[in-house]
Image (tube, grey):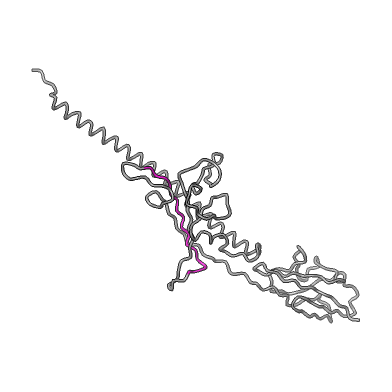
Amino acid sequence: MKTGFTIIELVITIFILSLAVVGIFNAFSIITILTSDSSDRLTATYLAQEGMEIVRNIRDQNWLNIDVGVPAGATWLDGLDVCFNGCRTDYSKNQLDPWANNETDYLKIDDGNGFYNLTNGTNTKFKRKIIITHPEDDSGNPIDYILKVVVEVSWNKKATILKSGLEAGTCEDNCIKAEETLYNWYNTPSSDKDILSFGFDKAGESYVINSDAITVTLPNTVNDITNLIAVFTTTGSRVMIGDEEQISGDERFSRDFTNPVEYTVVAGDGTTKTYTVNVIVED
């Protein structure tokens, strides 16, 4: 007796196979979507970390500027206050620019070195927004020595069978967010810049210090004032004649005091005060 498939059996078989093929296809589609999303999230994580490092570097550079007093009046917040409403930057900059929320915010990738930046290379799907704020104390007042840094990296996400599409700039399912708290551990530098005493370690000498002038009187036993070694104390961080730092009591910095000599005291905060030193020999 010969047997075979009936039409009904064939239709059922084709239906079952179709379901299997569609299921497998959908599974591969979902895997592809998830794989692509994982890659974007990994890239966004690195970009968020880089953004945080840029902010930290600017804070640290401000500390160095305060230490050397250049520019005068430098503070630890210089360049960071533009980010209270959001900003953008890249690794090649030493500053933060205001967030524009337009096409210029898209990061590019340099075809030569593979680095992400804002000026050169091929456009990417990523945007990076940095927001810096002061946290508040229990009374609602901002704490000026603490910064809360939030870095949001978002990307254009196409619509899929799972979710609708999203554009970069919105921090939803297409966004990696990193947060960190930065502190100002740097002690506020002193503005003191006075000379407290000044002389040449000569017996019988005396000195008078006014607001911007110092008069040193030497006994008539001193015959030569063209090679005197100054001995002084100061509240400043250093004492200068022109561009040369002076060291108290160091013979390498002996001076001719036939004419007035100007000493400039530099405070810890970079401000300065100049004294004119006059030497008089008693008759």
| Of the pair 272 and 46, the residue shown nearer to us | 272
Quadrant (top left, top right, bottom left, bottom right) of the N terminus = top left
The structure residue drawn at horizontal position 49% and vertical position 69%, both measured from the top left corner, is 143
Q: In this view, does 249 lie to the left or right of 124?
A: right
Q: In this view, does 273 lie to the left or right of 13?
A: right
Q: Where is residue 160 in the image (x, y as percent from the top left)?
A: 34, 42
Whether 83 is drawn above or below 271: the answer is above
Q: Position of residue 267 (x, y in %)?
A: 68, 70
The residue lying furthest to the top in this view is 1
| Residue 151 part of the magenta segment | yes
| Of the pair 154 and 193, the residue shown nearer to us | 154
| Residue 170 part of the magenta segment | no
The structure residue drawn at horizontal position 56% and vertical position 39%, both measured from the top left corner, is 112
The structure residue drawn at horizontal position 48% and vertical position 47%, both measured from the top left corner, is 103
Q: In this view, does 31 lie to the left or right of 246?
A: left
Whether 137 is drawn above or below 181: the answer is below
Q: Where is residue 72 in the image (x, y as percent from the top left)?
A: 65, 65
Magenta region, residue range: 142-158
> Residue 278 occupies which quadrant of the picture?
bottom right
The structure residue drawn at horizontal position 13% and vertical position 21%, both measured from the top left corner, is 4
Quadrant (top left, top right, bottom left, bottom right) of the C terminus = bottom right
